Amino acid sequence: MRLAGEIARSLADIGRVAVEGEVYRPQTYRAGRTYFTLRDRAAQMPVSFPARVARRCRAVDGERVLVVGALVWGNDRGQLVLEAEEVVPIGEGAVAAMIAETRARLAVEGLLDRPRRRVPRLPRVIGVLCGSEAAVRKDIESVVAARFPGYPLDVEETTVSGPGAVLSIIEALRRLANRPDVEVVVLARGGGDATSLLPWSDEELCRAVASCRVPVVSAIGHEPDRPLCDEVADLRCGTPSIAAHAVVPDRHQLEAELAGLMAAAARSVDRRGEIGGERLARAGVSGALSTGLQRASSRLRHAADRLAWAHPGPTVQSCRRRLEGCDWRRPMAAQVQSSRGRVESLGRHARSLSPQHVIERGFAVVRRLDGMVVRGPEEVGPGDLVELTVARGRISARVEDGGDEARR
């Protein structure tokens, strides 16, 4: 047992390996784990993988494959086993067969003919997933410099071919899509043979593209290259440069469109002002006012008729007569002038009756100390103090003669 532990620790230092060979006698057990032998003319190696990675592992008897995984020591059998993470076929025929099987599964689930999302015209940030090679990124950046210099890009470089590429691409896509400002993601890669482009036809990657939070643009290889991610993406472009033209807006075109819209809006406002002015010039103000008053008078008479029918009585009849007696045909200016004259007449009458006005003509008001107005000599006596209110103030006085003596 101590030896087994030493072997396991030694294998951990080796890390991930990639081995080519032929699949021999694959078997899947009830627990979902698959076993087969990877062999060539010189040696053979037992390989296994669990059900959770079965979508990335194609094990067909007699097919030449590339196995990516780690070496582990199986204590139960006492043997060295290659624990596979990916099993991908090698050769055009096997690659085509694998892609066809994956396409059939995706089609059954409706992922190939699902509704496509529209790529935003002005995305806040464009996410770009590409490899570390400079050509693809330089192509996209040159298109940005030509169409809209300084437009925000968020570039995520990752492994795009070879062992472990599928997992790296999926993780990079998730990181880009989870950034709140990224509103579209471009998958960009240069050309290559069928085997090097095989990660872009992986079933798990296609599902990640279809379920991505934002629209995904696929630009893998050249025009003839058609990996499966092209068929599930929201937009397929033949090259990364074409994809950049599709997602990066043209600044000059946008400015021209905005200028045209502003000019159209200004013309519309001017035209509406002209139409309004013409209509106002044609309209007769007094005639329109007379028509409106006649319409209001008709509605009032109709309301009075309905009120009289619902509640007959002298009060209602009186209201009806008052409504009918209203002269709504008189011009409004004449009514205002008449009302102003009546108000001025009432003001003059009220002023003539005002005690203050009487006092201003030379009269005075005499009050006792208790505030009562003295209307006759019998209401005061000699020595009483009184107050006289005149036009410009008050005067205090003492009565010398009053009462009965004044009457005599």
Image (cartoon, rainbow, N blue to C red):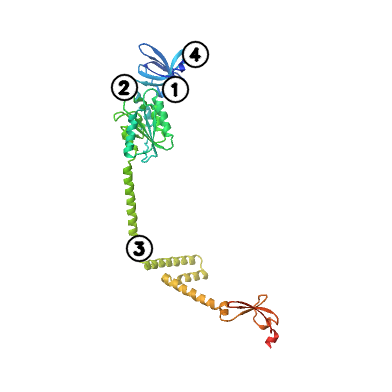
Could you give the CA–CA distance between mark 2 and mark 4, rounded to whole angstroms?
42 Å
User: Dots 3 and 1: beta carbons under 8 Å?
Assistant: no
User: Residue 304, percent across and down?
Assistant: 47, 67
Mark 3 Cα within 10 Å, few/some/many (few <14, many 20+)? few
Give the residue at x 35% y 23%.
Answer: 98
Residue at far bottom of view: 408
Disc on the earlier residue, 3 or 4: 4
Residue 6: mark in rendering:
4
User: Dots 3 and 4: beta carbons under 8 Å?
Assistant: no
Front residue of 273/51: it is 273
Give the residue at x 42% y 14%.
Answer: 46
Where is the C terminus found, in terms of image quarters?
bottom right
Q: Quadrant of residue 253?
A: top left
User: Residue 117, percent across and down?
Assistant: 37, 37
The reply to whether residue 1 is in sight is no
Residue at far left of view: 224
Disc on the earlier residue, 1 or 4: 4
**Disc number lying in front (1 or 2):** 2
Task: Inspect the image, locate mark 3, and give the three-letter code of the amino acid beneath it.
Answer: Leu
Task: Inspect the image, locate mark 2, and give the three-letter code of the amino acid beneath it.
Answer: Glu
> How many numbered tags mark residues here?
4
Q: Which residue is mark 1?
A: 51
Could you give the CA–CA distance between mark 3 and mark 4, rounded to whole angstroms?
101 Å
Mark 1 Cα within 10 Å, few/some/many (few <14, many 20+)? some
Task: Inspect the image, locate mark 4, and give the three-letter code of the amino acid beneath it.
Answer: Glu
Q: Which residue is mark 3?
A: 280
